[in-house]
Image (tube, rainbow, N blue to C red):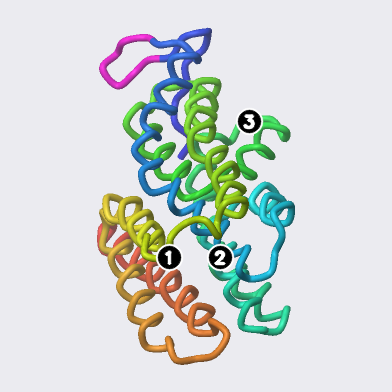
């Protein structure tokens, strides 16, 4: 359901205190700073991996700017390195990014009245970190108006997305100079654990997570990442079924 919005230049925080759009932007930027601890090595790792896969520096930067989706970028580079068919690469990346459709649906009640241009840049910058922080902020401060919600989102994006582009380029530029005994690959699992764990708040969330993980492990032996194509829809379908069951039980 759409949430109430306030009018004017100021919005209200959860404690009733007013704040400006500039403060909302800074709030989003500050809340995003902890992600840099894992975002920077994650981006550096992608630059290194992409370089080893045969991309040049310009292609790595273009990939990060145009796609702006770390998990699917890693998936594409890995599959291309394994000489997987292009159709498998495309389908695998789409499967990895199916969660963005759920993110978008979750944000609709909060950003429904945004203009087409505003929705376009939000869609472009919608990544795991920007979604996680935005939805938590909107739910905690339901009296924020649209202007302040967009300002908060922009603050998050400025800290999360721009460093991803810069440090993936840097990883490709100086990648060969990074010692092999520095394990940058720790960043990927830590990033997703830090984002997902606090958001597993309902039985539907837990069921979707469990089935997706179990499916990924069960089908890990399939070639070209096909296990992910099976596990992702299974997890989402399970979460949807449990959500429907929970709502019917609550209404009974």
Q: Is residue 101 visible?
A: no
Based on the displayed image, in which of its 4 quarters is residue 234 positioned?
Answer: bottom left
- Cα separation, mark 2 vs mark 1, equals 12 Å
Q: Can you identify the residue that label 2 sits on? A: 49
Q: Name the main secondary structure of what is drawn in magenta.
A: loop
Q: Secondary structure at mark 3?
A: loop
Q: Residues within 10 Å of mark 2 (few under 14, many from 20)?
A: many
What percent of the width, then of the height, locates residue 153? 50, 32
Question: Does 237 sit left or right of 213 as displayed?
Answer: right
Q: Nearer the viewer, mark 3 or mark 2?
A: 2
Q: Who's the residue at 62% across and 68% down the image?
A: 94
The tag on residue 9 is none
| Circles 3 and 2: CB atoms closer than 8 Å | no
Q: Is residue 193 visible?
A: yes
Q: Who's the residue at 43% across and 22% down the image?
A: 144
| Circles 3 and 1: CB atoms closer than 8 Å | no
Chain-order first, disc 3 or disc 2:
2
What percent of the width, then of the height, locates residue 154? 54, 29
Q: Nearer the viewer, residue 245 or 231?
A: 231
Q: Secondary structure at mark 2?
A: helix
Q: Can you identify the residue that label 1 sits on? A: 180
Q: Bounds of the magenta span?
A: 12-18
Residue 166 within the magenta-colored segment of the rendering: no
Q: Nearer the viewer, residue 50 or 200?
A: 50
Q: Who's the residue at 47% across and 27% down the image?
A: 152
Q: Can you identify the residue that label 3 sits on? A: 114
């Amino acid at each position: 359901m759409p949430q109430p919005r306030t009018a004017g230049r100021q919005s209200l925080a959860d404690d009733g205190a007013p704040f400006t759009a500039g403060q909302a932007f800074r709030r989003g930027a500050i809340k995003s700073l902890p992600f840099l601890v894992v975002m920077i090595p994650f981006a550096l790792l992608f630059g290194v991996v992409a370089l080893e896969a045969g991309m040049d520096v310009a292609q790595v930067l273009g990939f990060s700017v145009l796609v702006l989706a770390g998990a699917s970028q890693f998936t594409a580079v890995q599959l291309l390195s394994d000489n997987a068919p292009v159709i498998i690469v495309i389908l695998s990346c789409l499967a990895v990014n199916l969660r963005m459709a759920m993110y978008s649906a979750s944000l609709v009640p909060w950003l429904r009245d945004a203009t087409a241009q505003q929705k376009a840049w939000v869609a472009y910058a919608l990544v795991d970190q920007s979604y996680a922080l935005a939805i938590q902020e909107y739910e905690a401060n339901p009296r924020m108006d649209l202007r302040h919600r967009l300002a908060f989102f922009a603050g998050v994006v400025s800290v999360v997305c721009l460093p991803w582009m810069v440090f993936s380029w840097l990883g490709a530029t100086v990648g060969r100079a990074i010692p092999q005994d520095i394990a940058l690959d720790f960043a990927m699992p830590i990033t997703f654990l830090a984002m997902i764990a606090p958001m597993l708040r309902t039985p539907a969330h837990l069921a979707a997570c469990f089935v997706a993980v179990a499916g990924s492990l069960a089908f890990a032996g399939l070639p070209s990442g096909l296990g992910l194509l099976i596990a992702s829809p299974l997890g989402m379908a399970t979460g949807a079924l449990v959500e429907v069951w929970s709502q019917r039980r609550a209404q009974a």
